[in-house]
């Protein structure tokens, strides 16, 4: 596979792409929107379901601010599968477990997948397109999470 690129370079690429997917979850839970958007290409297209589609990094930043409706979240990626198109692009599928706590204390756990197309840029691998697919919702099921320090809600400052 991709002999011209070399097996060690491919392993480094796989590691960087996997870290990219996990970093998305960390930044989302911290509501570090600037760091989150930096994981995407400036011309990204993100489809989060039938009602929300972000086109471009500015729109993505604005649209992800909707996550402030939750008091806390805990996103966990797993099973990252990577298929390279060439040395500078790949298709990535990863599973995600997302826990959300509402301001009233009620919680919901959702399972889903991220279907990404990633590109190598001068800043490293970045997500160019993302489609989120929910595969289950267990609104009555809660899981314990570790407290995570979030950035302050900018709407309150």
Image: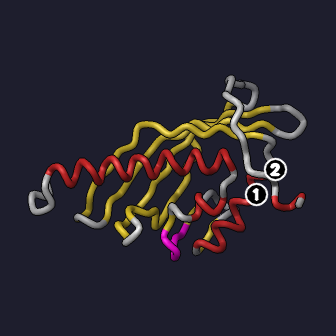
Q: Which residue is under mark 2?
A: 69
Q: Is residue 115 above or below residue 77?
A: below
Q: Quadrant of residue 126?
A: bottom left
Q: Nearer the viewer, residue 28 or 131?
A: 28
Q: Is residue 105 left or right of residue 91?
A: right
Q: Position of residue 65 (x, y in %)?
A: 74, 60
Assess disc 2: are there few (<14), some (14-19) or many (≥20) residues with their C-alpha within 10 Å of its C-alpha: few
**Could you tell me which quadrant the C terminus lies in?**
bottom right
Which quadrant of the figure has residue 38?
bottom right
Provide the residue span drawn in magenta: 41-45
Task: Measuring from the top left, give residue 49's x and y in whole percent.
Answer: 63, 57
Q: Residue 70: give x, y in percent of width and height.
A: 79, 45
For the stretch drawn in magenta, what is the main secondary structure? Answer: strand
| Residue 33 lies within the magenta run | no
What residue is shown with label 1?
A: 66
Q: 19 or 134, which lies in front?
A: 19
Horizontally, residue 119 falls left or right of residue 48, namely left
Residue positioned 39% across, 42% down in the render = 80
* Mark carried by residue 117: none
């Amino acid at each position: 596979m991709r002999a011209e690129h070399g097996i060690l370079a491919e392993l480094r690429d796989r590691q960087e792409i996997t870290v990219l997917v996990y970093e998305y979850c960390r930044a989302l839970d911290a509501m570090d929107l600037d760091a989150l958007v930096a994981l995407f290409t400036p011309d990204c297209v993100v489809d989060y379901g039938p009602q929300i589609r972000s086109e471009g990094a500015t729109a993505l930043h604005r649209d992800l601010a909707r996550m402030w409706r939750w008091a806390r979240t805990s996103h966990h990626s797993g099973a990252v599968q990577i298929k390279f198109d060439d040395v500078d692009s790949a298709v990535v599928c990863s599973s995600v477990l997302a826990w959300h706590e509402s301001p009233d204390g009620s919680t919901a756990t959702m399972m889903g997948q991220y279907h990404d197309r990633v590109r190598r840029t001068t800043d490293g691998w970045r997500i160019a397109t993302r489609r989120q697919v929910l595969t289950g919702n267990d609104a009555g099921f809660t899981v314990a999470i570790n407290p995570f320090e979030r950035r302050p809600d900018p709407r309150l400052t």
